[in-house]
Image: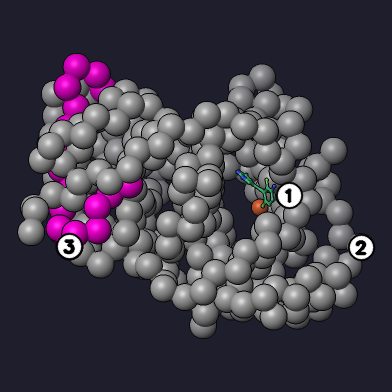
Amino acid sequence: MPSSRSITQAVLSREQGEGVGALVRRSIGRPELKNHDPFLMLDEFDVDSQGGFPDHPHRGFETVTYMLEGQFQHEDFAGHKGTIGPGDLQWMTAGRGIVHSEMPVKTNTRAHGLQLWVNLPKEHKMCDPQYQELRDQEIKRARPEDGIEIKVIAGESHGVSSQVYTRTPTMYLDIKMAKNKTVVQSIPASYTGFIYTLTGTIYVGERAFEGKAHHTLVLSEDGAETVQISTKDQDAHFVLIAGQPLKEPIVQHGPFVMNSEDEIYTTFDDFQSKKNGFERAKNWKSTIAK
Ligand code: FJE
Ligand code: FE
């Protein structure tokens, strides 16, 4: 068995329109990278003050919003409301139902960040909605050596553990590396995973697979329990995301992700009739969407 995972697929994400006047680079969820169990979607979003994601529902999974630059506001049908800024995290378990609005704060800086959709196992799909919110300073860092900073958003790195509770076992690391550095990160053998590169170029695995910015680099599933990542002549910034595959049927209709067609029909009915978790959607309109 190799000691480091290698890269089995590399896909560039170009900007595409999404939501209302928003741009995203879609990683997981694009045609070449459908349902990377347990992950459903990863978007690198870049939204100006004109765009956003006005009132929309979710059921059956979690949305994890991690800001890189600028400010984003959110408001849901239960009155939960707030603003997240650079480095802040919102881990939202939609469970049986959330209706909310996600809009940039109207300033001159773009709102830039990542939104990951983590699927929920069957027994958690209809759980109570939950928010886990961490400010930048509350997210723990591992510094295995000078020039390597790892923000532990979920899971564990170099003895540092995240306080986020994951119903689907998930590792989510934000890694910044100076040039000419090498890091070796442990990953549970059973996890599937990928790297999404934000800036710079990295080299992954024993064969030093080259990954440039805005690429999804899919990790091999060969039982190796580490991944080795190096930089050469450039600093780099990327996220490493891995998780335990659920191996359950996935039936997705937009923002509803269940295990069968039947459950999706029930979900449409629940949403239309405002029941089984969507009660508060009755006559609700967010105050932050235009
Ligand atoms: C969407 C359903 C959705 N990418 N990146 C359908 F939930 C969404 C949606 C998002 C989204 C939100 C943020 Cl803050 C960041 C995102 C999709 O809200 F766009 C469609 N079409
Ligand atoms: Fe949403």
Q: Are marks 3 and 1 in contact (CB under 8 Å)?
A: no
Give the residue displayed 77% in from the left and 45% down from the top: 54
Q: Nearer the viewer, mark 3 or mark 1?
A: 3
| Mark 2 within 8 Å of ligand 2, using the beta carbon | no
Residue 51's x, y, as percent? Answer: 73, 32
**Label located before the other in sequence (2 or 1):** 1
**Which x, y percent locates residue 124?**
53, 78
Residue lying at 67% horizontally and 33% vertically, measured from the top left? 17
Left or right of 133, for residue 18: right
3 or 2: mark nearer the eye: 3
Instruction: Tell me how far mark 2 sits from mark 1, CA to CA.
Output: 15 Å
In the rendered image, the vertical position of residue 117 relative to residue 68, given as above or below? below
Which element is circle 3 on? loop
Q: Nearer the viewer, residue 158 or 272?
A: 272
User: Label 1: which residue?
Assistant: 101
Residue at mark 3: 223
Name the mark on residue 283: 2
Disc 3/disc 2 C-alpha distance (Å): 51 Å
Work out how far the residue at label 3 is from the one at label 1, CA to CA, in angstroms.
40 Å
Mark 2 closeness class: few <14, some 14–19, many ≥20 residues within 10 Å:
few
Q: Nearer the viewer, residue 238 or 79?
A: 238
Q: Amino acid at mark 1?
A: Ser
- In the picture, which quadrant includes the C terminus? top right
The structure residue drawn at horizontal position 15% and vertical position 58%, both measured from the top left corner, is: 224
Circle 1 crowding by C-alpha within 10 Å: few under 14, some 14–19, many from 20: many
| Type of the residue with mark 2 | Asn
Q: Magenta segment, which residues?
A: 218-236
Viewer-nearest residue: 133 or 213: 213
The residue lying furthest to the right in this view is 283
Please determine whether, in this image, residue 115 is positioned above or below residue 188: above
Instruction: Tell me which amino acid carries mark 3.
Output: Gly
Where residue 78 sits: x, y (%)?
Answer: 75, 64
